[in-house]
Amino acid sequence: MRSIVGGAITCRADAFSGLSLMWLEAEDSSAVSFVAMVDSEQLRAKFLGSLLGAALGDALGASREGHRMAARYDGGLVTAIAGPLIYTDDTHMTIGIAESLVDCRGFDGAHMASRFVDNYAREPWRGYGPGPPRVFRRIAAGEAWDQASAHVYPGGSFGNGAAMRVSPVGLLLWNDPTKLRQVAHGSSLITHSHPLGVEGAALQAMAVAMAVAEDPANPLDTPFFVSRLRDWCTEDVYHSRLDRFSWLLERVDERTEVVAQLGHGIEAFNSVPTAIFSFLSHAADFVSTVTYAVSLGGDTDTIASMAGAISGAYLGVDALPLDWQERLENRDYISQLADRLWRVAAGEGLL
């Protein structure tokens, strides 16, 4: 283990031993066959699409965070946004997770927590809520990375803060559901230890992973996608939300009903299903996915970020408007990070 205060950040040597073998042992044989069938560059495009898609959804949604439902959800809702696209704490913490997974070639909770602490210290103005900085201060003072949040949130937080940042976990472990759940849970504990907050992160990571495994050249089997998510998650509140998808997908334009049934708040169970629904209802088009998510109002940056992460993982980076990419702050670094994460997933090591 390492000291969090002072000195260089280091990882446990065994953070992800046997990485190259892990893919051969994946439980989902269909996911393994996808690796064999799809060119590695397509997989790379999906990693790029997901991290950039999450950042774009975040930046576009930030302008309407806390607003009521928009009167429309045509492209003009977000294309009217001019100038640089500035992301919030959602993307800032997503970057922290990706950096740690790359540096450690897998999950190291102490290292990941230190990334959060250090990144927050450099850019505290990203729109963090009051809770995470309090957790970071405890960790920086020497408190255990998986214990500090319990002193800030007695009983744990079931907010969407763990889910909003988890897409790199879904990418790296897209064909190992068992390991994905373990790492999604571990990454959540740093700030959100309530079972509903933890499960929300796991569900979002799994949605990203499943999107990676899908070939966008073929129509998405939406009922199967939903059924697999439902079978995989463990909490009843998420089951009930997912059970409503089949009839809500026939009423996509009835956004008031969608929000009434799925929510658009900061709770994980009132936002993760909404993000997944935004993707599934517009799976063929990234712009429509993000625009719809933003149009629902409420916690727009987080819901659009999560929806963008899933959509980008499904469609790949070429589906993201080039104009948006060019205006996204820190685009080059996020792209490089996605590329490095892809190399770790492919077992190639880092450049």
Image (spheres, rainbow, N blue to C red):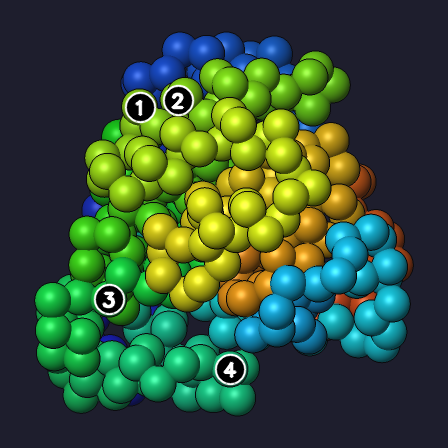
Can you tell which of label 3 and label 4 is closer to the viewer? Answer: 3
Q: Residue at x 64, y 43 (%)?
A: 254
Q: What number is the disc on residue 157?
A: 3
Mark 1: give few (<14), some (14-19) or many (20+) Cα within 10 Å: few
For badge 4, the amino acid type reads Gly
Q: CA distance from mark 4 to mark 2?
A: 34 Å
Residue beneath disc 1: 231
Q: Earlier in the sequence, mark 3 or mark 4?
A: 4
Is residue 195 among the parts visible in the rendering? yes
Q: Nearer the viewer, residue 339 or 189?
A: 189
Q: Are marks 1 and 4 in contact (CB under 8 Å)?
A: no
Q: CA distance from mark 1 to mark 4?
A: 35 Å
**Could you tell me residue 240's position as x and y percent?**
33, 36
Residue beneath disc 2: 228
Identify the secondary structure beneath mark 4.
loop
Identify the secondary structure beneath mark 1.
helix
Q: Nearer the viewer, residue 270 or 318?
A: 270
